[in-house]
Image: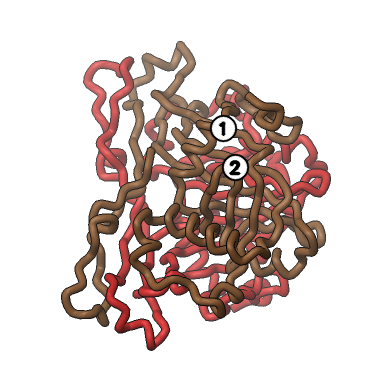
Chain colours: A brown, B red
Amino acid sequence: MSQTEMPTGRTRVVREPHRGVYDRETANRILDGGIICHVGFVAEGQPYVIPTSYGRNGNNLYIHGSVASRMLRQLKESVPVCVTVTLLDGLVLARSVFNHSMNYRSVVVLGKASLVEDGREKLEALRAIAEHIIPGRWDDARQPNERELKQTSVLKLPIEEFSAKVRIGPPIDDEEDYSFPTWAGVLPLELRAGSPIDDERLVAGQTAPGYVRKYARAQ
Amino acid sequence: MSQTEMPTGRTRVVREPHRGVYDRETANRILDGGIICHVGFVAEGQPYVIPTSYGRNGNNLYIHGSVASRMLRQLKESVPVCVTVTLLDGLVLARSVFNHSMNYRSVVVLGKASLVEDGREKLEALRAIAEHIIPGRWDDARQPNERELKQTSVLKLPIEEFSAKVRIGPPIDDEEDYSFPTWAGVLPLELRAGSPIDDERLVAGQTAPGYVRKYARAQ
């Protein structure tokens, strides 16, 4: 574990520290399993949290800038952000209301986000975002042209200061509650894909490719 | 639409304003459809975004405080927060990479969160949170006792300054791209419940109740 992977005072899990895990491999697996992230930034003392798409390339997160316009307008060189990815795995129903919980995996990345200016890096970032959302799609779609690249803003956030938090398993009740006459257990939750809906203006003969029909997130 | 439901400069949807909807009924429906929210707050200039459970009671959001310990420690009277709830409904695959999108519904609520001190309000807030997550559960579980109530922190955020954003429907491609030979359409996504997993220490005869077996989020 490198220096940058140690929890800092800002990323140490304060509440329920036994749920905090800090290794990069775990964090990357969670980041790769999500579809959207929630980006937090500050403007005039007010925090904002905006959902957006993202991708990972090595130790960098790339965030699609289109919905972060408020942040981008105030961005000079770089801006402090927090990017959080949460995978909800289940409801944990205990005997007591107090011990109800959820099974989840989440990663919080803190740092300074900067605009990607370099054309080649921006193209690679967009590829990372597209392939993150639906692997296989990039090569099948019409690639971005110069005008579109200029219109698109991408933010880069190094994955240096981060923490992951994971809860798995059954409910943990107080010992005296195990005799309480109610059902207890876990209700698993999963984000699942339905059947693809063809666009009305498809070119004749086009059918949904395998990466659409068999879409599933990496665990 | 009351004064407080008008978008302020802070909640007006800047990017793609046609996706911004501001009425309270729409926002409430989205808030009621989510399971977790992402809470943003600021400490020493750094934004933090933390996933947590929540519930709604009329025009107030109640946020379970256990994971917001960092925020609670710095909380005096009230603290500026942003609570965002996002429902991801599908991937929108256009012909061009540039026009790829997602179908989603999200609500952003800005305001000052305060600790709920009153015992009765706290109990009602916890009931709202529990019933929000899984309706029917509160009455089946062992109710909170005085000690547990004291240990639990609940934050209240009035739903006054808010905005909702919704994208639905097929991809919108540039006219000249409709002849591009690739599949296009929507891949619907839905958070679905699996089969309930019994706790190993169930009292004999307890089976998963209907509100667990038939769990589904309100649309």
As displayed, is residue B112 above or below residue B210? below
Q: Which mark is residue A59?
A: 2
As displayed, is residue B66 above or below residue B97? above
Do tag 2 and tag 1 residues touch (Cβ < 8 Å)? Answer: yes
- Quadrant of res B139: top left
Q: Is residue B204 left or right of residue B153?
A: left
Look at the numbered disc 1 and give the secondary structure of its residue: helix
Asked if one can make out residue B116 in the rendered structure from this viewpoint, the answer is yes
Chain at tag 2: A
Residue reaching furthest front? A120
User: Residue drawn at (71%, 46%), measured in percent from left and top?
Assistant: A111
Q: Is residue A171 left or right of residue B150?
A: left
Q: Which label sits in the foreground, 2 or 1?
A: 2
User: Residue drawn at (47%, 36%), measured in percent from left and top?
Assistant: A104
Q: Which mark is residue A24?
A: 1
Residue A15 point in image, percent of width and height? 64, 28
Tell which of A27 and B208 is nearer to you.
Answer: A27
Q: Which three-letter amino acid code belongs to the residue tagged 1?
A: Arg
